[in-house]
Amino acid sequence: MVGGPGAGKGTQANRLADRLGLPHVSSGDLFRRHLRDDTPLGRRSRRYIDRGALVPDELTISMVEQRLAEPDAEAGAILDGFPRTRPQAEALDALLARHGGQLAAAFYLDVDRDVLLRRLSGRWLCRASEDHVYHDLSHPPKDAGRCDFDGAELYQREDDSPATVRARLEKQLPPMFEVVDYYADRGVLHAVDGDQPVAEVTDALLRTVVSPAK
């Protein structure tokens, strides 16, 4: 799943996972799992996280490789949050090739920058799972401050103010577009208009799975 922050990658990856019977592999969830379980990869990552540095690609790729080796991913998986850069995309191809596999498709949720800004300002996340996303205007929870799925507390990131969001987009979108170009050049990119109701985006993604565009 490729797209800018706020494009709906986690939501759509979760829905596709349910419909296709494949695991949803979120890089954010992988980091939290390794940090929580204090694994060797988690301990190595914490050295960078604790000082505010970026975790090296090699650690992220190792986490992804371990996850894809688990039994439930034998038939494939839906990756969310990885790859974020062209070098990561190239490393993913190499990883899959080592295990005799390849990337089947890259789904690009195409959402205008101004729409991303509106989505990210006022967004609320579930403390139990960041796949459960709410918004003050477009998707408020049934009970204020509580997740509809698990009743967990909702919280808002401190960096979700419009000015901070603009700065994030300026930083994160250019490498994302490099990933888009990389997969387009390889002929595996399937772009879908992400500025539609959630169910319509899911249906559009599923149509590309059944009858991928050539």
Image (cartoon, rainbow, N blue to C red):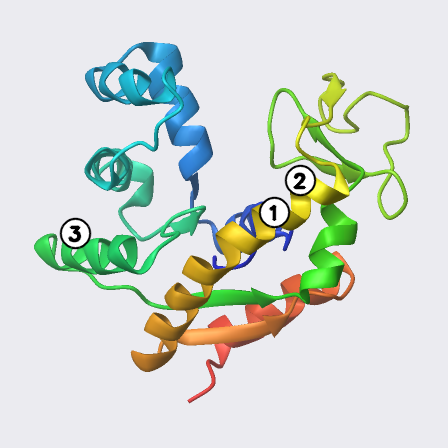
Q: Are marks 2 and 1 in contact (CB under 8 Å)?
A: yes
CA neighbours of label 1 inside 10 A, class few (<14), some (14 to 19), many (20+): few
**Residue positioned 31% across, 44% down in the render:** 73
Q: What residue is shown with label 3?
A: 95
- Pointer 3 or 1: first along the chain: 3
Instruction: Name the front one of labels 2 and 3.
Output: 2
Q: Which numbered disc covers residue 186?
A: none
Residue 161: which quarter of the image?
top right
Tell which of 157 and 126 is nearer to you: 157
Residue 102: which quarter of the image?
bottom left
**Residue positioned 43% across, 69% down in the render:** 180
Q: Measuring from the top left, give residue 23's x and y in whole percent.
A: 42, 43
Q: Are marks 2 and 3 in contact (CB under 8 Å)?
A: no
Q: Measuring from the top left, give residue 144's x and y in whole percent.
A: 90, 23
Q: Amino acid at mark 2?
A: Thr
CA neighbours of label 2 inside 10 A, class few (<14), some (14 to 19), many (20+): some
Q: Measuring from the top left, give residue 183's x and y in whole percent.
A: 35, 72
Residue 68, above or below 128: below
Q: Report how far apart the C-alphas of labels 3 and 1 lie in the structure.
A: 32 Å
Q: What residue is shown with label 2?
A: 164
Q: What residue is shown with label 1?
A: 167
Q: Amino acid at mark 1?
A: Ala
Q: Is residue 187 visible?
A: no
**Residue positioned 50% across, 52% down in the render:** 172
Q: Report how far apart the C-alphas of labels 2 and 1 lie in the structure.
A: 5 Å
